[in-house]
Image (cartoon, rainbow, N blue to C red):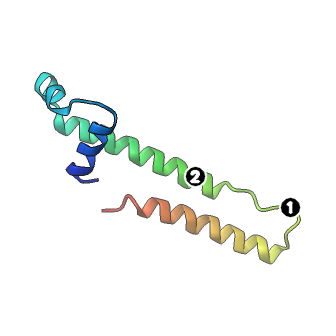
Amino acid sequence: MTRDEYNILFHKVGLNRVAFKAVNDCDEEILALVNAAIAAEREACAKVCEDLPADELITRTEATVWDMATLDCAAAIRERGAP
C-alpha cells in the first residue's frame, strides 16, 4: 500500500494520524504493523482457497481441475502482496 492509501484508511477509521504520530513518533512502526496484518490476512484467505473441498460427486478429472483452480486462487491472493 502507498502512504496515501494508509492516510485514507487512517481517516476512514477516524484516527488522527498527525496527533498519534506526535505523541508516539512511530510512523514506520505503524506501517510495519499494518503491513504485517495485511500479509497475515492475505495468507489466511489463500489457505481458505487451498482447503476448499471438491464435491464428492464430481469425477476424478473434475476434481483435478478443481484442485488446480483452488491453488491458482491461492497463488493469485499471495501475488497481490508481492512487491
- Could you tell whether 39 is left or right of 45 in the image? left
**Relative image position of residue 42 (x, y in whole percent):** 47, 51
**Relative image position of residue 44 (x, y in whole percent):** 53, 47
**Figure check: 51 above or below 7:** below
Element type at mark 1? loop
First in sequence, mark 1 or 2: give its number.
Answer: 2
- Could you tell whether 6 is left or right of 62 in the image? left
Front-most of residues 18 and 50:
18
Q: Quadrant of residue 6?
A: top left
Q: Residue at x 41, y 61 (%)?
A: 80
Q: CA distance from mark 1 to mark 2?
A: 20 Å
Name the residue that disc number 2 marks. Answer: 47
Q: Quadrant of residue 21?
A: top left
- Could you tell whether 14 is left or right of 77 in the image? left
Q: Are marks 1 and 2 in contact (CB under 8 Å)?
A: no
Which dot marks residue 56? 1
Amino acid type at image mark 1? Glu
Front-most of residues 50 and 80:
80
**Relative image position of residue 11 (x, y in whole percent):** 27, 38
Outermost right residue: 57
Q: Quadrant of residue 34?
A: top left
Which dot marks residue 20? none
**Figure check: 50 above or below 3:** below
Label 2: how many residues lie within 10 Å, few (<14), some (14-19) or many (20+)?
A: some
Element type at mark 2? helix
Amino acid type at image mark 2? Lys
